[in-house]
Amino acid sequence: MSAKKIYWCIVALLFAGKTMAEINNTDAVNDLVKRVMQDKAQYFVTAIIPRENGRDVFELESGNGKIILRGSNGLSIASALNYYLQHYCHCIIT
């Protein structure tokens, strides 16, 4: 077995149950929240949730002084942030 195959087997074992896209997306979406919200980013929490009926979904919730953005992937979480900003803060960031 090549070194490359061994590497990917180890990665698969370490992150069983999560896809590489989900792992990378959570880091990327947290970075997005930091860029967009700047000093207010500390008031946001992100989390991955399962898809529903094969479709991407997002949820918004508030609790403990934080806005919780959940989505089935990074794009869904970014959509939750966009929805929050448009419908609750009445602002659009492009």
Image (tube, grey):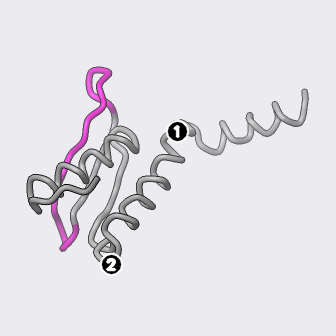
Q: Residue furthest right?
A: 2
The N terminus lies in quadrant: top right
C-alpha separation, residue under disc 2 versus residue under disc 1: 27 Å
Residue 58's spot in the image, x, y percent?
Answer: 24, 41
Crowd band around label 1 with a 10 angstrom C-alpha radius: few (<14), some (14–19), many (20+)? few
* Disc 2: CA contacts within 10 A as few (<14), some (14-19) or many (>=20): few
Tell me what residue is drawn at x 21 percent, y 45 percent.
59
The numbered mark at residue 39 is 2
Single out the residue that lies furthest toward the front.
94
Going from N to C along the chain, the mark reached first, 2 or 1, is 1
Give the residue pinned by disc 1: 21
Helix, strand or loop at label 2? It is helix
Q: Amino acid at mark 2?
A: Asp
Q: Is residue 57 magenta?
A: yes
* Closer-to-camera residue (64/30): 30
Number of marks present in the image shown: 2
Tell me which corner region of the image, top left, top right, bottom left or bottom right, holds residue 34.
bottom left
**Type of amino acid at the residue the image marks with label 1:** Ala
Query: Residue 77: which disc?
Result: none
Of 84 and 19, which appears nearest the observer? 84
- Place of residue 76 in the rendered image (x, y in percent of width and height, measured from the top left): 32, 41
**Residue 9 is a magenta residue:** no
Secondary element at tag 1: helix
Q: Report which quarter residue 54 is drawn in.
A: top left
The magenta segment is 51-66
Location of residue 81 with respect to 44 vertically, above or below = above
Measuring 25% from the left and 57% from the top, which residue is drawn there? 93
